[in-house]
Image: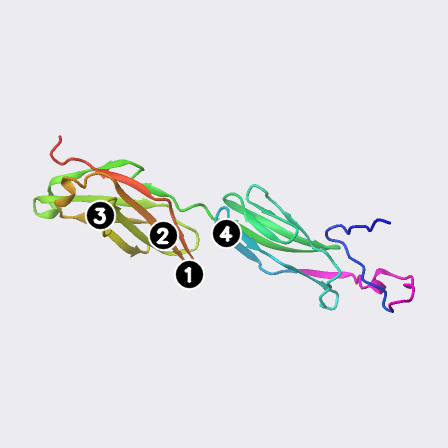
Amino acid sequence: MRSRIPRLGSCIPGPPVNPGKPAQRGPPADLGCRPVGSVIVSADTLKLNQAEVGQLTGTVLDNQGRPQTTWRVAWTSSDLSVASVDSSGAVLAVGTGTAVVTAAAGTALGTAVVTVRAPLTLLSPAEGAYVYQYSLAPFCNSTYGFQIQFDWTDYVGAVAYELWVKHAGATYPLDSLTVAQSSYTDTRCVSYVITDNATDWQWHVTAILGDGRRVTSATGTFNFTDPFQP
């Protein structure tokens, strides 16, 4: 005889109260399937990066607030293009936006709002762009210099950003500093960039989140113009 697999969100009857004796007929509560009073989800909100997985759990309570382990929780997502959820409550961040994940048991529901952050993206200088380098920089008392405006997207939950700038062949970075906003203007009075180090510059940004986590952008590249060319 085949055993029936309980549907998600339904009750899994337990063994008879007195083992070895036939189970007495009666309402589902006789087998441990008490009516559901509520479903409590482990978090009200969940913030994830794209492709990240978060875990939610659902606790089923009866009308007296007592946990009921005989119920299977059914999980659903309001927007599968933002977040999907499997039968164990594991949430996969699919795309930027907000979705409501629902845990159901009987007629009771519990929910969590899932927010998938937009990726941390470098804006300026654009990939492979040429940055103007001054042969006579007015802000450097008429010596060589350059001025670069670095910009990137705001990242949800970030309290600060670390900017890292380095030539591909250099030992030490030109910039490795922390700023509060999503932009930084670097003004330098130098001459060493003019010759062999004009190309192959790299940069990236790391968002520091309020909970201590860190998210780093892809690495971008840029070059300097030749200040002696018109």
| Snapshot quadrant of residue 32 | bottom right
Could you tell whether 118 is left or right of 228 in the image? right
At mark 2, the secondary structure is strand
Q: In this view, does 174 lie to the left or right of 4?
A: left
State the CA–CA distance, disc 4 to disc 1.
Answer: 14 Å
Q: Quadrant of residue 214?
A: bottom left
* Residue appearing at x 36%, y 52% in the figure: 206
Please state the extent of the stretch shown in magenta in the rendering: 19-39
Residue located 59% across and 50% down the image: 100
Task: Please report whichever mark, 4 or 2, sits nearer to the chain's N-terminal start.
Answer: 4
Residue 58, percent across and down? 65, 59
Q: What residue type is labelled 4?
A: Leu
Instruction: Check if mark 4's residue and mark 3's residue have beta carbons within 8 Å.
Output: no
Residue at mark 4 to residue at mark 2: CA–CA distance: 16 Å
Q: Which badge, 4 or 3, comes first in the chain's sequence?
A: 4
The tag earlier along the polypeptide, 1 or 2, is: 2
Q: Name the residue under label 1.
A: 212
Query: Tag 4's secondary structure?
Result: strand
How many marks do you count on the picture? 4
Q: Please tell me which residue is depicted at 30% across the width and 51% down the height of the picture.
A: 163
Residue 2 at what x, y percent from top left?
84, 49
Q: Mark 3 points at which residue?
A: 170
